Image (cartoon, helix red, strand yellow):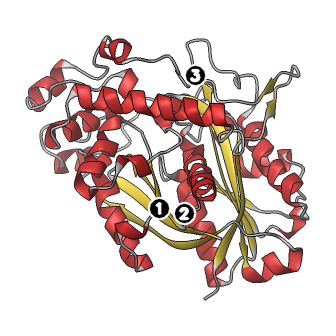
């Protein structure tokens, strides 16, 4: 079995979605992903006809993100028509799963050169719009989870806060640190290393994330009201203290990412420089009501696959869908928070669902390169009680 190498990773700036849309609203999702795809070719100077497959993550596959959005992005990027593409949905971990599928293809000998990408335009294709008013679970699943079936992720975050004894103050303090770290990384130019600019149809160039609140404070965060409280959930879950707010949850955002993965033979053939080796990947399922806690068991599963321990890992990225699952993960693992999300996370940088796996990965690799670390670990909680884990080795 051959090794799979990360040659390059790029992402667009994340654009915060407001009531009137985001900076990217005038741009079609296919064109947004195409920015990241073209950047890989331009930065690394290879013939895109050599790409065996493009695997893209996207969660809300309806409207302009329907009909295999990754294939549309490949064509929009100007790649030859011979380059195939497919779109996967592992919820928030969709582009992370795309990386795993791409790496597995290389390791198995099915691919020599593959791109794992992701996109989400949450301003033009709102989260849950693909449900179209329908129940996606069905009566059998609902009956399996007594008391009312599955719940929305905000309620799951509240359940995690209750189970792990996380206070509103804990979550707000963590959220403030996310903004502070992101602001510091932006000021230092660390984020700029990860980003390729996006040119809008009117010629406007977007070159930086716009959701970072450098002036945030505990007072401001403390003034926000709980976002998910409702009478039905109060009755079903009397243990909840209702402390999850918009301030300690990820931002709704638009964005795209792309990762170039190659075999050793292709790296040598094209004269590319590999930045990292993919050591191990895994995926796991857990309680779909609590939903966001699967990051804990997937951590040990991935470490076991790699033959490593937490002490071997120099940098961690744990997706900040909410502050609660990150803090629960920290409590359970005992990892030093100083090693986690060092450039800030989704609370400050945004969470464009299908693209976030790539955003975390480029942040992880950038951290390893800047600090001289060897191994990095990444994980993301996902709807349905799922989580992916990934370990890379900086080269």
Q: Nearer the viewer, residue 84 or 31?
A: 31
Q: In the image as oriented, which residue stretches furthest toward the bottom? A: 1
Q: Which residue is mark 3?
A: 17
Above or below 9: residue 135: above
Whichever of labels 1 and 2 marks the residue nearer the N terminus, that label is 1
| Residue at point 60%, 51% (across, down) | 358
Q: Badge 2: few (under 14), some or many (20 or more) residues near its Cα, within 10 Å? A: some
The answer to whether residue 121 shows anywhere in this view is: no
Residue 21, by quadrant, is top right
Q: Which residue is mark 1?
A: 314
Residue 344, position in %: x, y?
50, 38
Residue 220, by quadrant, is top left
User: Which one is closest to the eye, mark 1 or mark 3?
Assistant: 1
Whichever of labels 1 and 3 marks the residue nearer the N terminus, that label is 3
Check disc 3 and report its element: helix, strand or loop.
loop
Q: Which residue is mark 2?
A: 373
Residue 88, by quadrant, is bottom right
């Amino acid at each position: 079995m051959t090794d799979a190498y990360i040659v390059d990773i790029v992402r667009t700036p994340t654009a915060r979605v407001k009531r009137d849309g985001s900076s990217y609203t005038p741009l079609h999702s296919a064109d947004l992903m195409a920015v990241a795809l073209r950047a890989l070719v331009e930065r690394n100077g290879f013939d895109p006809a050599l790409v065996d497959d493009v695997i893209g993550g996207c969660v809300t596959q309806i409207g302009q993100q329907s009909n295999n959005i990754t294939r549309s992005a490949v064509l929009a990027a100007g790649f030859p028509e011979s380059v195939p593409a497919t779109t996967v949905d592992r919820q928030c971990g969709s582009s992370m799963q795309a990386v795993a599928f791409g790496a597995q293809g290389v390791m198995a000998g099915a691919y020599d050169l593959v791109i794992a990408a992701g996109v989400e335009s949450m301003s033009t294709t709102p989260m849950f719009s693909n449900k179209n008013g329908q129940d996606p679970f069905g009566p059998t699943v609902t009956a399996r989870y007594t008391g009312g079936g599955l719940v929305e992720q905000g309620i799951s975050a509240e359940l995690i806060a209750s189970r792990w004894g996380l206070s509103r103050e804990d979550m707000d303090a963590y959220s403030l640190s996310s903004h502070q770290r992101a602001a510091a990384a932006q000021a230092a130019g660390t984020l700029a290393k990860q980003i390729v600019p996006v040119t809008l149809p009117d010629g406007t160039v977007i070159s930086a994330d716009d959701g970072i609140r450098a002036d945030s404070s505990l007072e401001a965060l403390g003034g926000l009201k709980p976002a998910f409280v409702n009478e039905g959930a109060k009755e079903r879950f009397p243990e909840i203290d209702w402390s999850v707010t918009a301030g300690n949850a990820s931002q709704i955002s638009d964005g795209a990412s792309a990762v170039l993965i190659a075999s050793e033979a292709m790296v040598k053939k094209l004269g590319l420089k590999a930045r990292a080796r993919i050591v191990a990947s895994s995926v796991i399922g857990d309680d779909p009501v609590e939903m966001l806690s699967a990051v804990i068991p997937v951590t040990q599963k991935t470490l076991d696959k790699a033959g490593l321990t937490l002490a071997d890992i120099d940098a961690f990225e744990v997706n900040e869908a909410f502050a609660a699952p990150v803090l629960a993960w920290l409590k359970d693992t005992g990892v030093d928070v100083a090693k986690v999300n060092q450039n800030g996370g989704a609370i400050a940088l945004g969470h464009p669902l299908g693209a976030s796996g790539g955003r975390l990965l480029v942040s992880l690799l950038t951290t390893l390169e800047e600090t001289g670390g060897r191994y990095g670990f990444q994980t993301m909680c996902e709807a349905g009680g799922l989580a992916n884990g990934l370990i890379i080795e900086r080269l």
